[in-house]
Amino acid sequence: MRVQATRESTAWVDVDTARRTCSCCNDTCEHVELASDLVLDRGRRNRWLVRSAFHKELRRGNVQEARHWAAWMVHCDGRDAPLEYLRKIWSEETANLELAVYLHGSQARLPTAIAWFCHATKVWQMPAWWDVFQAHEEGTMPTGTRAARWSAEMRDAADDDAALAELRDQVLDELSSDGRLTAQQLAVFRTRYESGRFENEDIVLLLLLCSRLPACDVGRPDSLPSVPRRFVDGSTLLLPPVCAYDYHTAVGKARMRAWLAAHPDSGFGFGVDTTPVDLRWAGGLAPLFWRVQAWRQFGSTAGMDATAWHELGVDAEALQRFAAWCGWWPENMVA
Ligand SMILES: [Zn+2]
């Protein structure tokens, strides 16, 4: 099979997985290990890397690469795995209720789901999403509103699962009886909450309560971007992007620990050159804050991609406010 020679390159090397040989002839060949593990062992050692790469490309809106990693995820984890994963993360990345309903419907098709997900407005691109999220985390929602009351009740009930479930039920009933949630949208929230596998569904409900959910987001695509067959038929393998090596993978964690060991007086703070660790597209709050700031400055994924983690000038006042409530930093994830 053919494996991408180096990241960002259009050249390929030939790997024989059975004989464990590679045409690159490098002592540091990473092609054989990855290709053999995925092909022969269904990603026993690298399935989380595949999943992380899939997630990062969805987040970056890269349809072709997302389709590629979804195909490898099917090979490793079964046919339903990518779609089930999209259902779990829809609210981590978007607030697109129409997309959520599609993902949970029996007619959902993976290529359409991926293209739609890639093009949907991302949470860091929505100023209202960040305003509401931050105010909820801080406990500073404008007082006297239903949203403020619910936010406060949710914060008070943070450690009580039964109380949280009841508060969610109350709001779902309210929103559906006054027509702000359709029956299908309501079913999505119930499915996610009942499964215990959900992300930022609470924030989407808060946005609805505040009437601050953007009315129009990207609808279902009319046509699908064409993706060359070799990207999805198992005959080729891309190297996972650098940003896939975060705290979701053993290799990524090892890299982060090695970086911290080499820079004992530093964490992965803003303005710090973290090379070769790339946290711009990682999950968690600090990377999310980075993306909010980067989007405000560049307004495009391309502009964000062209700017390293440490090159972004983060607004001092926004950072001070964020740091006051955020107890989550990347280095804590690998300590
Ligand atoms: Zn090689």
Image (cartoon, grey):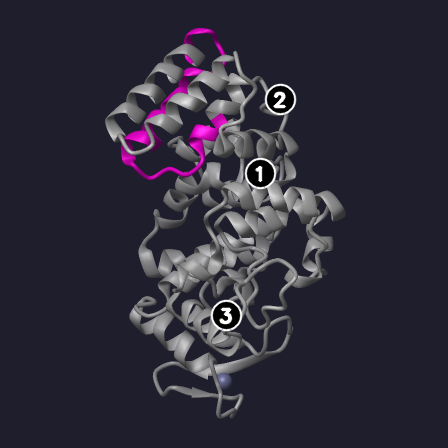
Which residue corresponds to mark 3? 236
The mark closer to the camera, 3 or 2, is 2
Q: Nearer the viewer, residue 307 or 325?
A: 325
Residue for point 41% across, 75% down? 34
Spot occupied by residue 277 in the image (x, y as percentages of width and height): 54, 68
Instruction: Tell me what residue is drawn at x 40 percent, y 79 percent.
Output: 33
Give the residues drawn in magenta, as a range: 176-204
The residue lying at 51 percent from left, 75 percent from top is 3
Residue closest to the eye, 120 or 251: 251
x%, y% of residue 20?
38, 86
State which tag comes first along the sequence, 3 or 2: 2
Q: Mark 1 sits on what residue?
A: 123
Q: Is residue 307 magenta?
A: no
Q: Secondary structure at mark 3?
A: strand
Q: Residue 157 placed where, x, y %?
A: 32, 27
Type of amino acid at the residue the image marks with label 2: Ala
Between the residue at mark 1 and the residue at mark 3, the CA separation in whole angstroms equals 32 Å
Residue furthest to the left: 162
According to the image, label 2 marks what residue?
A: 215
